Amino acid sequence: MRTIHFNCYKISGRLPLQKIAAYLEMSFPIRWKDYIVVKGKHLDMILKYRASSKQVYLFEFGCVTFVNFEGDEIRVFLEHLESITGILNSEYFAKYYETHTIKVYNNGECKLWKGNADFVEYNDYIIPIVSTVLSRSVALSKIEADAGRLLDESENIITFLQKGKLRASTKRLASITAKIMRFEYDSIGNIKVLERSSLIDQSIEARSIYDILADHFELGERFENIKNKCDELQKIIKTYSSLSYNNAENKLLLFEVFLLLLFPLFREIRSLLNILLSLFTF
């Protein structure tokens, strides 16, 4: 029996896969590809020794999955990667990650996660599938966290505005709207997080393994949760716009009332001035 260890981290918003592949002298098509895998001689060059049982999967949406790596080896690889790309977000690395193991038995069967009662036949495509699902789970964790923070901030603004504690202004509206639009743009950029890879589509067995793992990590449910939060953010933009407009309209009405009240006062002042003027003329 052998155990395969996986460690997946979010390390940046995006990874320039073509730049990395070019540096490592790896072929990489111009069209979309799900990931690049660093192994064999390319990985040996980075670690400075033979690493036949180790692999690294780099995903365009900023996640990296390490297969059978020790902590020091992860550090060495990331330092090398940063020297190529110049981007490595230590905050992401510390907050968004997943670990996973699968056990492969001598009869050629494996358990896809600890505690799973079912056995499946082990095939080489299982490692990229597990690496892919882990990366998508980690990517969703980051999106979920961003959506939650933005939703809390937006709801607080609405609460303050409804209580009259926040002055409505186009600047404030523009700020919160820009944040929401940026989040939605980044989320759209990660939409391929939930698509099966081209490798997974090659066989019914591979698709089945992917679906089992995707269900285990609740990828579909989490995506729906994010979608619902995005819908709430859109409603908040509309609510904020409406409240801001109403506040501005109310201020304009008050100003108009103030001007209307001034007209009789002006007439009284004018009459008083005329009386005083007539007195002085005598």
Image (cartoon, rainbow, N blue to C red):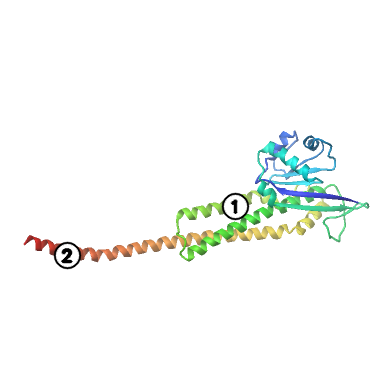
- Give the residue type at disc 2: Leu
Q: As displayed, is residue 180 above or below residue 263?
A: above
* Nearest to viewer (mark 2 / mark 1): 2
- Give the residue type at disc 1: Phe
Q: Residues within 10 Å of mark 2 (few under 14, many from 20)?
A: few
Question: Which disc number belongs to residue 88?
Answer: none
Disc 1, SS: helix
Q: Residues within 10 Å of mark 1 (few under 14, many from 20)?
A: some
Q: In the image shown, does 52 or 211 lie closer to the viewer?
A: 52
The first of marks 2 and 1 along the sequence is 1
Question: Which disc number belongs to residue 183?
Answer: 1
Q: As displayed, is residue 255 above or below residue 54?
A: below
Image location (x, y in percent) of residue 142? 66, 53
Q: Residue furthest left?
A: 282
Q: Which residue appears at 74% of the width and 42% of the height?
A: 75
The residue indicated by pointer 2 is 272
Q: As displayed, is residue 40 above or below residue 194?
A: above
Q: In the image shown, does 275 or 251 lie closer to the viewer?
A: 275
Q: Residue furthest right?
A: 107
Image location (x, y in percent) of residue 182? 57, 50
Q: Is residue 201 visible?
A: no
CB within 8 Å, label 2 to label 1: no
Q: In the image shown, does 18 or 258 lie closer to the viewer?
A: 258
Image location (x, y in percent) of residue 173? 49, 55
Q: As displayed, is residue 59 above or below residue 224?
A: above
Question: Taking 253 as reference, is 81 left or right?
Answer: right
Q: Is residue 255 visible?
A: yes
Question: Taking 148 as reference, is 43 left or right?
Answer: right
Q: Which residue appears at 50% of the width and 60% of the height?
A: 240
Disc 2, SS: helix
Image location (x, y in percent) of residue 196? 74, 51
